[in-house]
Structure formats: structure tokens, C-alpha cells
Amino acid sequence: MWHAVDVDTWMARRTSQLGAVKETVQGIIDQVRDRGDAAVLELTEKFDKVHQEDLAVDEDAREAAYEKVDPRVTESLIEAEARISRFHELQLPRGLWLNELEPGITLGVKTTPLSRIGAYIPGGRAAYPSTALMCTVPARIAGVEEICCCSPPPIQPLTLVALDIAGVSEVYQCGGAQAIAAMAIGTESIDPVEKIVGPGNVYVTAAKMMLREYAEIDFPAGPSEIAVIADESAVPSFVAADIIAQAEHDPNAACLLIATSEKVAGAVGAEVKKQAEIAPRKEIVLKALNNSGYIVAGDLREAVAISNTVAPEHLSIQVADTLPVLSGIRNAGAIFVGPYTPVACGDYASGTNHVLPTAGYARQYSGLDVHHFCKTSSVQILSREGLESIGDTIETLATAEGLFAHAASVKVRRQEKKNGRTGL
């Protein structure tokens, strides 16, 4: 169950899953493209064993969900939403900034929210109201006008309550690759979106990547994973608790300990075995631990290098001197520093986002935030004086490229000053 692994084997295991399902996912995409709602309903009955007449969750069902949720849980969701909102509001870019860099030349950037996005909220083994908040709150704060959510049926009341707290009213009961296809391509019930965000299983992740010609995505976000860098100052029970917490997500979750000695690896391993035996979701935990293990690094510098190679979704740093290790990290979805910062804080209520790139994609992607729901346009404003100051450069380069009309578009304006033309 708890065993040594090497980096190459670890990375191959994390990245080999998508290719195995592409043919199946392509078949699902083709069905949704050809038959719309009918295909989504049939695939929902096939994969989720739920028969439905339509996809949309109506207002009455959303309101009734509150009666099925413990008021204390609702209050906690409201508090979590406030903390998530507070953090993401700090990320809001300026709507427009302009800077006169030299006389007559003003440059800037205009930021505009996307108009319509889709959020995938996993279901199946458990309800994930926290993910409902994480996917939709930053979109709302960014100014997205239409937020469409899909989740496998039956959607848990907890998820519906969370979406209502987040201000989302467009919700559909469908999951898997068929839900991603419906949001990307569009069906009779679901209008196509500009971007799809949210985590999911390997089929969901593959569908997101395969449908990017229709809708952009946040990043590949598959089964959960964690890496922990630990030295002899780490508390083995704390480290093991974080490992078990990630392992309970999914049988395909993966947990990696990067220890500075065999002693640390052994102590953590003993705790992992002990805690796994009493875990409420023991069956899932044990399967996930088969995908997991430890690497012993020669020192913390090597541990950091290993972590940067792995590029984990979650990285926990549990060492005596945290700052040098934190400073050396280049690739991680989210970083949790010190013994009293369990990953669960970011999962629920510290305010940071828990929708993060997995399978090594943290090398090139950032975790979900407000910027994922915005696009930018450069702005330039030139006066006659400004155009004159760079006119020769533009005309020379345009002519060198053989784009003579480009050069002429500048020249005609410069001549206008000489000829005294002032418009119609």
C-alpha cells in the first residue's frame, strides 16, 4: 500500500490516462453534436442510471433544496462564499488603464468579462458544494453575465444550495463527457458557452481538451493529487492526515511524500497505514494509496527539484525552514505552508480556489481565478505628434515586409498635416 516510487513512473502514471479514453469520448461528442438533448438524456440514463424527461433544474427544485440541508451547513456555505468572494475581489483587474508613454502616444489595456461560461460540478460519489462555489464565485465577480452549470444527476441538495448562494440559476442535470459536449457545442436546452471550467474524471478532462475548438477551458483538472515535502521537523500524523484527505477523493487520486530521509518516510508511512484503516471512506482511500508512495531526497534542494518536476496540484511544505523551500517552488497549483495549514483550508474556506491543474499541468497553468473569466484588448491613442514620432519607423518596416498599403495608411495621415486637410 505505501511504497517507494520514482519520478518517471509517477509522471507516466499521471499522464497516461487521457489517451486511453479519447476514442470513447469522441463517440460521446459525436452523439451530442448529432442529436443534442436526446443524446445527452440517453447517455445520462446509460452512465448515471437516471431516467429524465428534461435536463434543466427548475426554480422550485432549487428552492426546495434548502429544506433538505442542515441550516448549519447552509450558514457555513454562506461564510465560505463570503471568504471566497473576498479573496477573488482582490484579483479584479482595472477595467481600463491608459498611460501616456511619450508625447502623443497613449497605450493601455481594456479588460472585459466573458459573456457566458459553463461550470462543471462533479457528483456521483459525493456532493461537492465547495466546488460549486469555487467555479462560479470568481466568474460572478469578474462580471460574467451568464453562468451555466452542469452536474451529474441526481444533483445533491447541497450543490443546489451552494449554486443558489453563488447566484447561479441556470443548472442542468447531466454529467460526464456528454455534459461538456453539451456546453461546448450546444443543444436544444443548453446554449453554447465561451469557456468551460471545473474539475472532473478522466472522461470529463479529455472532453474539455478535445472540445477547445468550440469553447476554451480553464486547464486539465482531473483526479486529485498532493505532494508533501517533509523533513524531520514534520509531524507524521499531520502529514499522513493530508495524504489520507486527498486519497479519499477518488480511487484515482494520487499522493506523493517527498521526504528528506528514510526515517521520515517510514514514520509517515506508519501513520498513513494507521489512519487508512479507520478512514470512513477506507475502500476509496486504499485504492488511491496504490497510486501513491514516497521518494527520499538527499536534501531539501533535491526535494524542491523533485516537486517542480512533479508539478503537483496541491503542495504541502512541512519543514523547519519554510521560506527557502517556498522560494524555490516554480510548479504547483496551490501551496500550503507549515504544520497548521492543511489542504482542507483551501478546499473550503480560507478563500483561495481549489480548482487547480493536475497531472503536471501546473507547469504551465494557474489555478482558477478571476482572470480566467476575463479577456483583454490593448488600446492605443495617437495624436498627430505621436504618429509623426514613429511614422518613419512604421513606413520603413512595412515597406521592408512588402506591405505597402500599411505604409500608405501612415503616410496619408502625415501628408494630411502638410496639405491642410481636416476631414469632410
Image (cartoon, grey):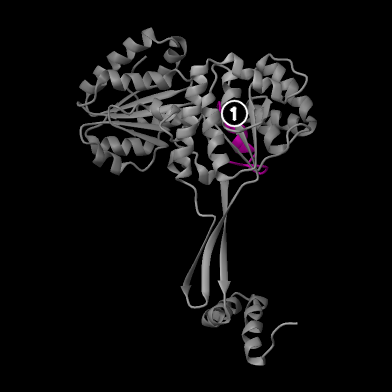
- Give the answer, above or below, for where 324 lies relative to 346: below
Q: Where is residue 170? Give x, y as percent.
A: 68, 31
Asked if residue 367 can be seen in this view, the reply is no
Residue plotted at (37% across, 7% down): 278
Residue plotted at (20% across, 26% down): 232
Q: Where is residue 306? Give x, y as percent.
A: 32, 35
- Examine the image and state in which quarter residue 260 appears: top left
Residue at numbered disc 1: 163
Q: Front-most of 105 and 34?
A: 105
Is residue 315 toward the left or the right of residue 235 in the image?
right
Q: Does the stretch in magenta take in 209?
A: yes
Q: Residue furthest top?
A: 278
The amino acid pointed to by label 1 is: Leu
Asked if residue 22 can be seen in this view, the reply is yes
**Which segment did they paint magenta?**
200-217
Q: Where is residue 117? Give x, y as percent.
A: 63, 40
**The C terminus - image quarter:** bottom right
Around disc 1, counting alpha carbons within 10 Å, would you say few (fewer than 14), some (14 to 19), or many (20 or more)?
A: many
- Give the answer, above or below, for where 352 lies relative to 56: below
